[in-house]
Each structure stands twice: as structure tokens, then as C-alpha cells.
Amino acid sequence: MIAGERDYQRIFTIVIDSLGVGAMPDAALYGDAGTDTLGHLAAVRQTFSIPCLQRLGLANLHPISQVSPIPNPIGCYTRMREKSVGKDTMTGHWEMMGLHVTKPFRTFTETGFPEELIRELERRCGRKVIGNKAASGTEILEELAEREIEEGAMIVYTSADSVLQICGNEETMGLETLYQYCEIARELTMREEWMVGRVIARPYTGKKRGEFRRTANRHDYALSPFGRTVLDSLKEAAYDVISVGKIYDIFNGAGLTESHRSNSSVHGMEQTIALAEKEFCGLCFVNLVDFDALWGHRRNPVGYGDELERFDVLLGKLLERLGPEDLLLVTADHGNDPTHTGTDHTREMVPLLAYSPSGKRSGPLPVSETFADIGATIAENFGVEPPMIGTSLLKSLHG
């Protein structure tokens, strides 16, 4: 453990992927006027129990059906606005750690990938491409996996994110071949007009409809951050920088000292709780993707609310393990209103809930004008180089 003066030895930053709390002022430019992920998912429920988030001040921050504000929350709370353009996962996370993204990542949700890219991918891989549209990963397997196997083809698809995904049967195509195709796709999509944030290998098993199952051998080929982040500064200063969930993929491993892949958001919280029982000095950065992938994109507000209740139970277990030298930050990276049209992310503000057992104050904070206030707070606490954008909230948390 590094010696020296700091307010907190450990900071846990948990991203509830896509938990927006109301439309950004410029949301109409993105077709997202009136969106409100948290408010709208709660409105469809007969009951809603999130007592730990309630204690931290979430209902004081934002109206939630079935969940009342409380007189004395234990946390500080505010909304954060996104300074960068876009509403992508990478954009949101990179901004948190101090990067200002001025050019949005390319998405091909509405059109599929350009014919020129598909033809070059077919030529380089020696397989015919089928699919080439935005789709759910499980649904496209039911639709096209039998054909892929029979024809020796290759399923290529995208989503609302800036991604190119390739499916491959582990038995008929083979993992190494699938990974090779994805490396080719990554090379091709470095061209400006085709550039996507990630190329993702999506291996699966099974021989016929109803039997297809995606495996845990997924592999992401991501862009590296275009500049220095707070993660880099922490690592260079010999602090622990531990990731849970898809943080590794979002930053392409840059600035991390230890990484843990998660099978689900529940698993990610279980991993975080286990890490809280160990001694380290630095940052534990967590992404919980199921909120976005399973419920937001699939426009399922009931499932989203159920996932939030499961998270709240595990949040309670994490709170029990925090000590006076720990700081917990709970936030999100964008919205994905499950009652909105389409299947895309939504341009929303995100919550920030901050809590430490040693906290001297609680209650509202001023609205943050950038997600980078999180990175600036972490940087000031550990005495490392501050990000180019963002203002530390450390003094505000102490009153």
C-alpha cells in the first residue's frame, strides 16, 4: 500500500450501465426529447424496492414511482451532464476518466455496414457474410446460425452501439478462426469512414434452432483511448487500478493493473464485494452491463426494474464492507429508456451518488457539467495528474 496523505485509500466507482435520470438539454437533437430511463421504468411497476439506493439519496435526486424521498439520506447526490457528443458506452466512460470526445463513434444501426466493407471482409476471410443488420445476439443465432453452419458463411451484425460483431460456431468454424476474422475486421474498421469502437467475437455452440448458446469465449477488439486518462495516471503512480466487467474492453486494457470479467451484473457485484474484502490502495472501476444489454436495448422496463432490485440487495452487502477510508461512487454512462422508441441509447443526464462511512456531509450537490468530475475527484484524492476536463468534488463531499 502506498504511503502518503489522501482522503480515501480505496474508491469504488460503479457504473449502472444506462441508468439515465432525464433528458439532456440537447436530447432533441438525438431524437430523445422526454426520455427518462429511471423514471419511466419505475412508472410501470406496482411495487419497487430499492432501499439502499433510497438511503443514498436516489429518490431525493429524481422522482421514482413507489420510492419516496427520505429526510436524511446518507449520501451526497447530483445529476451529471455529458460534455462529449454522442451517447455511446465508450464515450461516457472515457469522459468519466477525463477525455472530451468531440466526434461521435460511428454506428450502423439503421443501414448495416457499407457494401464495400462487407465485400472486403468476405475477400479477406474467404466466407460469405450473412446478416449485416442491427439485431439481438440471441435472435440472430436463431435466425441465421443454421444457415451459417450449412453454407460455411459468417454472421456479421451490429447493435445500437458502435460495434461490428461476428458470430462463429466453436465446432464448425473454430475459436481461433473466429478470432482471426475479427482481427481482420478490426484492421479494416480502422479506416475513418468505417471506424467502430469495438469488433466483438461472438462464439456459440449448438447445431439447430433452440439449441444455440453463446459461450464465455467472447473477445473484444477495442479502440484504445485517444489520450491520457486518469487510469493511466493512477497506474503510473503505482496505485491499484482494478476493473470489473467490461471496463477492460472499454479502455482496451489501458491504465489497468488487474481485471475481472463478469458473467452478469449480479456476478459483477459479487466480484466487487469480494474485492472489498481485500486490501488495496487505488480504484475499483465496475461496469454492470445487463441493465443496458438485457433490458434497455430490448425495451423491457419490468426486467430493468427487477435487475435494479437485485443490484440493490448486493449494494447493501457492499455497503457493509466499506470502511472509513473508502469512497463509493455510483453513476451511469448514458441512458437507455426502455419505454422509448427504437432500441438505441438515449441522451440523458446520469446520477452520481457518493458515500463514505466517514462522510461529514450528505445531501444535494450542484449539477455537474461533465462526467469528468468523477475522474477529477479520483485524481485529486490520490494526488495524480488531473484530467484536462472536470472539477474535483472532493471538497464538496467533505462540506
Image (tube, rainbow, N blue to C red):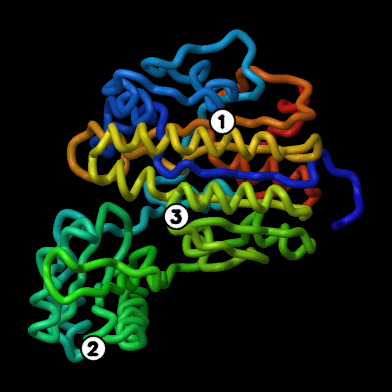
Q: Secondary structure at mark 2?
A: helix
User: In the image, what residue type sits under mark 1?
Assistant: Ser
Of residues 390 and 167, the one drawn nearer to the viewer in this rendering: 167
Give the residue pinned by disc 2: 125
User: In the image, what residue type sits under mark 2?
Assistant: Cys
Give the residue pinned by disc 3: 90
Residue visible at 64% across and 46% down?
A: 375
Residue 69, placed above or below residue 92? above
User: In the image, what residue type sits under mark 3?
Assistant: Met
Give the residue pinned by disc 1: 368
Residue 24, placed above or below residue 63? below
Residue visible at 39% across and 54% down?
A: 103
Mark 1–mark 3 distance (CA, rounded to whole Å): 19 Å
Q: With 6 as the anchor, is 56 left or right in this view?
A: left
Residue visible at 67% across and 62% down?
A: 232
Residue visible at 8% across and 76% down?
A: 147
Q: Residue furthest front?
A: 211
Q: Is residue 111 visible?
A: yes
Q: Which one is closest to the eye, mark 1 or mark 3?
A: 3
Q: Secondary structure at mark 3?
A: helix
Give the mark nearer the N terminus: 3 vs 2: 3
Q: Which mark is residue 390?
A: none
Of residues 179 and 164, the one drawn nearer to the viewer in this rendering: 179
Q: With 192 as the anchor, is 328 left or right in this view?
A: right
Residue 284, placed above or below residue 193? above
Q: Which one is closest to the eye, mark 1 or mark 2?
A: 2
Q: Secondary structure at mark 1?
A: loop
Q: With 373 as the anchor, is 93 left or right in this view?
A: left
Q: Is residue 225 visible?
A: no
Mark 1–mark 2 distance (CA, rounded to whole Å): 47 Å
Mark 3–mark 2 distance (CA, rounded to whole Å): 28 Å
